[in-house]
Each structure stands twice: as structure tokens, then as C-alpha cells.
Image (tube, helix red, strand yellow):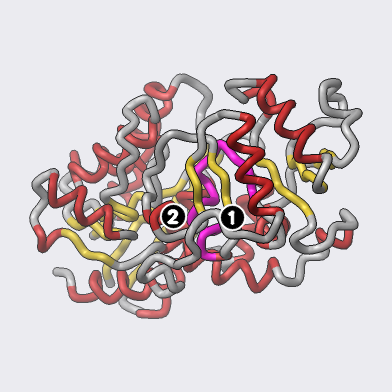
């Protein structure tokens, strides 16, 4: 029986990898092992997500050691070298583009183990973003590239990768969304917060990390004058915002509750790309305070709008959405249908 090791560190990588474990299990000819690298404070969420996917025997956990990104990558490469020597996998599948995925890909390549690039070919063209460097390196050592959207195909072909190594299968993170949304539908988080669907805005911007604190405060104050604004992860001790009526500061919810909040938001304002694919599939407008994204399909087809950090433009867009008019498009990218993991399993079943 073929052995496949999947690797994940951050939540996004786990959500890409977890559906593959289920798909491989169903095929009956794969022995999957999902290696999760945990950082301090991530154990509780990991356990909850692992339970949601029914993962137990297929899991291995590595505790991340503190240190610089270079030091962490080096220590993880050594850890993966030992693990791969023990398991002798036929394939290694980095689940995302985090440090553990990079370390696992490099260790496997050095040991002559075929690497499968998942979510391959994505490019933001922002070399200041660590994920961009990791994407490039993982793709460069991969034997096969499973692509989640058409931009990945074009990028890989332009970079000289052979056509037969590029397979368009869809987005496995949407497989996870399909699985977890059934549980999110049962969440009582809206009742607990006394929120009505589509009557609130969710803001996913950490105030301490905001490049322009004054702009953020101005936008939130103006938004709160017309709608309830939910601020997960914000502290009520934030003096600049605590007195603003309409702002709801809450602890960061668990992932299942977060999905429910996102689905029922009028729109989401964020400076992160974490939920752009899920929001597109859920048909929730997303205003992203970034200049680029590695998933252009969410902008070209979906609900994602890249927007400059300009208070007037943000509030103008928000006003249009709150009036009931769409800001972006509302199409779902091809093969974002919850069956990507099954397609990948079928390809690997035929691989020698």
C-alpha cells in the first residue's frame, strides 16, 4: 500500500490537506499520514478541527521550536528527515506554503521522495511575502502540480513546467468548507451575540498590526454609525474604539463559529487573504486592504475586491454594499465544488 505524508503548520494548510486524508482513506490503497506542526496556543483549535474531520490514527504532531524563520525551517527539515526515514513514504504533499510545508518539501526532495505541490502555481508577485517565496520553492522541487485555479496553470506554464506535470483539480480548501459548513450551520454564535444575519459587518484586522491605525479608527467609527461592526480579537480596553457605539469587540471565535459569522456578515473588511476563497464560495462581499492576491479568481470571478487603504474609498464601497448593491462578481471558480480531493486521489491512484 502506498504511503503518503501530508504536512501542515498553519490553519490554511491543514484545511487544504485534511480532505485528502479522507479521500485517500476511501480509496483503500493509500496509507495517509498527516503531520501537523503546532505552534504555542494552537493545540485546542487543532484538536477541534481534527475531530471535525474524524482524524485520529492518521495524525502525527510535531511541536514547533521557538526561533527565527530560518532556524525553524532548519530544525523542521531535520525532523522531517527522521520521519521520512521511518515512514518511507511514496509521496510527500505539503499542504500549504508555510514554513513546515517548505521544510518538508526540501527534505523530501533531498531524499529523492516525490513532492506533490498542492494549490500549485499561485503567485502574488510580492516577494516581500514569505508565502510567495515558499510557493516558488515548493513548486520548483515538485514532481506533480495540482492546480486550484486557472491562474496557476498559466503561471506554471510561463515558468517552463511541463504540461503533463500540471493538473487542474480545484481547491481542496473548499472541500473543507463543504465539510465544516454543515457544522457551522448548527452554530449558535449569532444567538449568543444577539446578531441577525446580514445585519452586521465583520472586520478581520488586528489593530496592533494595522499599517495605518488612524485610518482604521476613522473607518470603524464611520461604519459603526450605519451598521453593527463585529471585531473578533479586539480588546474592550482599546481606548480609541471602546466608546464607539455600534462596535462589538469579542474574543476570537473558534473556526466553526467564525465560518458562521462570515457567512452571515453583510460584508467582510480585512487585510488578510485567509478567507478570500471561502467568502467567494459563500457569496459574501470581501473588501481586502491589499495590493495583490495569489488567488486572482476571487477578484475576477468572485466577491473579493482589492482596495487601497483610503478611508473615503473604503466607506464608499461599504455604503454601496450596505445599500444592497453588489460590489464584485458572484461567480464560483471552476472546480471549487468540494470534490478536488477525490480528483487528486484518482490521479495518484494511477501514478507509479
User: Label 2: how many residues lie within 10 Å, few (<14), some (14-19) or many (20+)?
Assistant: many
Q: For the residues marked 2 and 1, what is the alpha-carbon distance in whole angstroms? A: 10 Å
On the question of residue 103 being in view, the answer is no
Span colored in magenta: 268-281
Residue at image position (37%, 50%) is 296
Q: Identify the mark at residue 298; answer none if there is no mark.
A: 2
Quick check: can you spot residue 129?
Answer: yes
Classify 10 Å Cα crowding around label 1: few (below 14), some (14-19), many (20 and above). many
Residue located at (88% from left, 32% from top): 244
Which of the two labelled residues, at mark 2 and mark 1, occupies the earlier sequence position?
1
Residue in view at x 14 percent, y 69 percent:
352
Q: Please state which of residues 114 and 343 is positioned toward the viewer in this rendering.
A: 343
Q: Which residue is mark 1?
A: 285
- Asked if marks 2 and 1 touch (Cβ < 8 Å), the reply is no
Q: SS of the residue at dot 1?
A: loop
Magenta segment includes 111:
no
Amino acid at each position: 500500500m502506498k504511503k503518503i505524508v501530508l504536512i501542515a503548520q498553519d490553519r490554511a494548510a491543514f484545511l487544504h490537506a485534511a480532505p485528502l486524508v479522507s479521500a485517500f482513506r476511501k480509496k483503500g490503497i493509500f496509507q495517509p499520514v498527516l503531520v501537523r506542526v503546532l505552534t504555542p496556543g494552537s493545540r485546542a483549535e487543532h484538536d477541534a478541527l481534527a475531530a471535525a474531520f474524524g482524524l485520529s490514527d492518521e495524525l502525527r504532531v510535531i511541536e514547533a521550536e521557538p526561533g527565527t524563520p530560518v532556524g525553524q525551517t532548519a530544525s523542521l527539515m531535520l525532523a522531517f528527515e527522521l520521519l521520512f526515514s521511518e515512514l518511507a513514504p511514496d509521496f510527500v504533499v505539503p499542504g500549504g506554503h508555510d514554513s513546515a510545508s517548505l521544510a518538508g518539501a526540501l527534505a523530501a526532495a533531498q531524499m529523492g521522495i516525490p513532492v506533490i505541490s498542492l494549490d500549485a502555481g499561485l503567485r502574488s508577485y510580492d516577494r516581500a511575502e514569505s508565502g510567495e517565496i515558499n510557493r516558488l520553492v515548493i513548486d520548483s522541487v515538485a514532481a506533480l502540480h495540482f492546480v486550484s485555479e486557472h491562474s496557476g496553470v498559466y503561471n506554471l506554464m510561463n515558468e517552463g513546467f511541463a504540461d503533463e506535470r500540471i493538473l487542474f483539480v480545484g481547491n481542496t480548501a473548499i472541500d473543507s468548507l463543504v465539510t465544516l459548513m454543515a457544522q457551522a450551520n448548527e452554530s449558535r454564535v449569532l444567538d449568543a451575540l444577539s446578531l441577525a444575519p446580514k445585519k452586521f459587518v465583520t472586520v478581520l484586522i488586528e489593530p496592533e498590526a494595522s499599517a495605518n491605525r488612524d485610518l482604521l479608527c476613522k473607518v470603524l467609527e464611520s461604519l459603526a454609525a450605519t451598521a453593527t461592526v463585529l471585531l473578533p480579537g479586539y480588546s474592550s480596553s482599546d481606548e480609541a474604539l471602546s466608546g464607539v457605539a455600534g462596535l462589538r469587540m469579542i474574543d476570537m471565535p473558534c473556526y466553526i463559529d467564525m465560518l458562521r459569522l462570515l457567512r452571515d456578515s453583510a460584508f467582510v473588511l480585512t487585510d488578510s487573504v485567509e478567507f478570500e476563497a471561502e467568502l467567494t464560495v459563500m457569496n459574501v462581499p470581501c473588501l481586502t486592504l491589499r495590493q495583490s492576491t495569489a488567488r486572482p479568481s476571487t477578484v475576477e470571478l468572485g466577491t473579493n475586491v482589492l482596495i487601497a487603504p483610503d478611508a473615503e474609498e473604503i466607506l464608499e464601497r461599504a455604503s454601496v454594499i450596505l445599500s444592497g448593491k453588489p460590489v464584485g462578481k458572484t461567480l464560483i471558480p471552476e472546480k471549487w465544488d468540494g470534490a478536488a480531493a477525490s480528483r487528486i486521489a484518482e490521479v495518484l491512484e494511477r501514478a507509479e
